[in-house]
Image (spheres, rainbow, N blue to C red):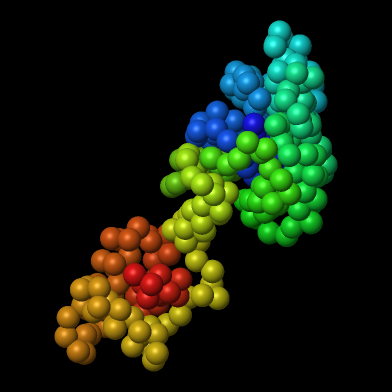
């Protein structure tokens, strides 16, 4: 009752999973990943022991296929399981047990494994594979595009409920203290993939580094807009605030709204903050 895609970005050294299911909080069950080791999607009567065990084996140097063979060999209920893996080097592997409910199956390709069960038909995994391969952009963008395409192609025959995106990268977590680069879940929603994409866009707004091309000097029209909206939002008072007052008000707004990752030096602003401010 789930479809997923596991992927790897060899340039950025990112491993990740995108998944959707007619199941509450699928992100708490299916995706597992560790930077430098690999990523795993365990589903269909999911054996959650597959996650940590596979990561341990791949961290030891086992390939995705070797790891898969070891996992299923030790599981008496292997024919009810479905799992997709990407190892430390980006090699894929996918397994669908004979007892998984139709339609069930998977496909692997360069740096990805796509799989699903209780699907409308095989076009769901074929669409995920095709879109992941053809899409340009970050690993997150490619995984989300693939997941969305899978849904559009048919998806889970029972419907929609939850979705998740989990990507790891060495020191990619908040403050660089762990590898949890992107960890987003939609636990119960009528259109979980679209909601996941919306939340991902918010995550990028809050935590992605500023684009140098979107950093502007606070002068002219930018200054006028900034003063107007800071005043409207009660961060500024008075008609002709000084440069210091504008900076203090902008800093207060940035810290209140958690935009510290986009904070600039005195006299400059990330225009993404101003655009967000206009919509507030």
Which part of the image, by quadrant, shows the C terminus?
bottom left
- In the rendered view, would you say 38 is above or below 213? above
- Give percent across and percent down for residue 3: 67, 37
Q: Position of residue 149 (x, y in %)?
A: 70, 52
Rendering coords of residue 47 (x, y %)? 62, 19
Image: 85 above or below 152: above
On screen, residue 165 versus residue 260, left or right, reads right
Give whichever of 12, 100 is nearer the camera: 100
Quadrant in which residue 44 is drawn: top right
Q: Residue at x 58, y 49 (%)?
A: 193
Residue at 33% x, 65% y: name it: 254
Q: Nearer the viewer, residue 148 or 256?
A: 148
Query: Which corner quadrant of the image does residue 68 belong to?
Result: top right
Task: Note whether 182 is above or below 116 in the view shown.
Answer: below
The residue sitting at 55% across, 76% down in the picture is 213
13 on left or right of 206: right
Q: Is residue 196 visible?
A: no
Figure disc tally: 0
């Amino acid at each position: 009752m789930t479809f997923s895609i596991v992927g790897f970005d060899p340039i950025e050294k990112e491993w990740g999973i995108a998944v959707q299911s007619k199941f509450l909080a699928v992100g708490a069950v299916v995706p597992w990943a560790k930077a430098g080791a690999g990523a795993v999607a365990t589903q269909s009567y999911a054996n959650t022991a597959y996650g940590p065990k596979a990561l341990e084996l791949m961290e030891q140097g086992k390939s995705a296929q070797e790891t898969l063979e070891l996992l299923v060999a030790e599981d008496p209920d292997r024919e009810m399981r479905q799992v997709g893996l990407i190892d430390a080097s980006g090699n894929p592997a996918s397994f669908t047990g004979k007892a998984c409910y139709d339609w069930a199956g998977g496909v692997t390709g360069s740096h990805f494994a796509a799989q699903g069960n209780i699907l409308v038909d095989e076009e769901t995994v074929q669409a995920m594979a095709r879109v992941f391969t053809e899409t340009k952009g970050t690993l997150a963008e490619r995984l989300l595009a693939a997941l969305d395409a899978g849904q559009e192609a048919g998806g889970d025959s029972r419907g929609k409920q939850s979705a998740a995106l989990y990507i790891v990268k060495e020191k990619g977590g908040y403050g660089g203290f762990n590898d949890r680069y992107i960890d987003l879940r939609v636990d119960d929603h009528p259109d979980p993939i679209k909601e996941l994409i919306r939340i991902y866009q918010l995550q990028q707004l809050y935590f992605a580094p500023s684009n140098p091309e979107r950093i502007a000097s606070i002068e002219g029209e930018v200054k006028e807009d900034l003063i107007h909206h800071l005043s409207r939002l009660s961060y500024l008072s008075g008609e002709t605030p000084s440069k210091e007052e504008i900076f203090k008000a902008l800093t207060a707004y940035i810290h209140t709204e958690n935009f510290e990752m986009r904070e600039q030096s005195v006299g400059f602003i990330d225009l993404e903050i101003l655009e967000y401010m206009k919509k507030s």
